[in-house]
């Protein structure tokens, strides 16, 4: 079953374009979504490749796809969540430009959808720390999910 997971927020973003190019807004410190700054990084993914599964135990993620297109899949495994066991699929691209805010303890992963590669930006509220992360393989049977 696919539906919205409690705590995941989708915020439409602005792209300001003219004959010289574009400015793509992502996150401001006066936004209701913003908690605090930890780190910004960019991740590339090739067409039909999968980067999954992982979760952050402490960090809140803020994803935006600034180039190409990806399928972002989320899985709620939080024991006291009303959406426990639910998958949520989101299709991200500059044409559907949005910020996806993911609270801690939500499994997530990406599949590249465009030829060449796609770029995802992530603004975490904590600096990246492998010790607060959990990783599983894309085909892990726990998820029963077909990419």
Image (cartoon, helix red, strand yellow):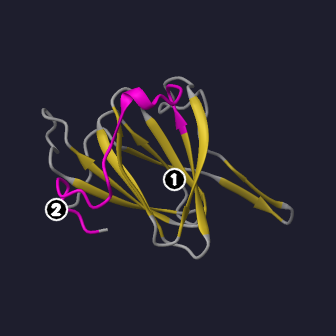
Residue at 40% over, 27% down: 131
The residue carrying mark 1 is 98
Q: Is residue 94 visible?
A: no
Residue at 44% over, 31% down: 130
Specify the farthest residue to the bottom: 115
Q: Give the range drawn in magenta.
A: 123-146
Q: In this view, does 57 lie to the left or right of 13?
A: left
Q: Where, by quadrant of the figure, is residue 77 drawn?
A: top left
Residue at 28% over, 56% down: 88
Foreground pick, 119 / 36: 119
Q: In this view, does 118 lie to the left or right of 24?
A: left
The residue carrying mark 2 is 1
Judge depth for marks 1 and 2 and give the one in front.
2
Percent x, y of residue 15: 67, 55
* Image quarter of the N terminus: bottom left
Percent x, y of residue 2: 22, 60
Specify the farthest residue to the right: 20
Q: Where, by quadrant of the figure, is residue 93 drawn?
A: bottom right
Label 2: state its secondary structure: loop
Foreground pick, 3 / 104: 104
Mark 2 closeness class: few <14, some 14–19, many ≥20 residues within 10 Å:
few
Residue at 25% over, 41% down: 6
Q: Could you say which disc has been placed on residue 134 in the image?
A: none
Residue 113 magenta-highlighted: no
The answer to which of marks 1 and 2 sits earlier in the sequence is: 2
Percent x, y of residue 139: 27, 61
């Amino acid at each position: 079953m696919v539906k919205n997971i409690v705590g995941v927020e989708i915020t439409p973003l602005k792209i300001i374009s003219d004959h010289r190019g574009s400015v793509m807004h992502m996150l401001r410190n006066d936004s209701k979504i913003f908690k605090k700054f930890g780190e910004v990084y960019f991740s590339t993914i090739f067409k039909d490749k999968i980067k999954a599964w992982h979760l952050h135990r402490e960090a809140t993620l803020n994803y935006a796809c600034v180039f190409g297109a990806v399928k972002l899949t989320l899985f709620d495994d939080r024991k006291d969540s009303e959406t426990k066991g639910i998958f949520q699929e989101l299709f991200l691209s500059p044409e559907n430009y949005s910020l996806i805010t993911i609270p801690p303890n939500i499994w997530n992963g990406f599949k590249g959808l465009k030829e060449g590669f796609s770029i995802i930006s992530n603004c975490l509220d904590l600096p990246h720390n492998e010790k607060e992360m959990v990783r599983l393989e894309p085909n892990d049977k726990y998820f029963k999910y077909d990419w």
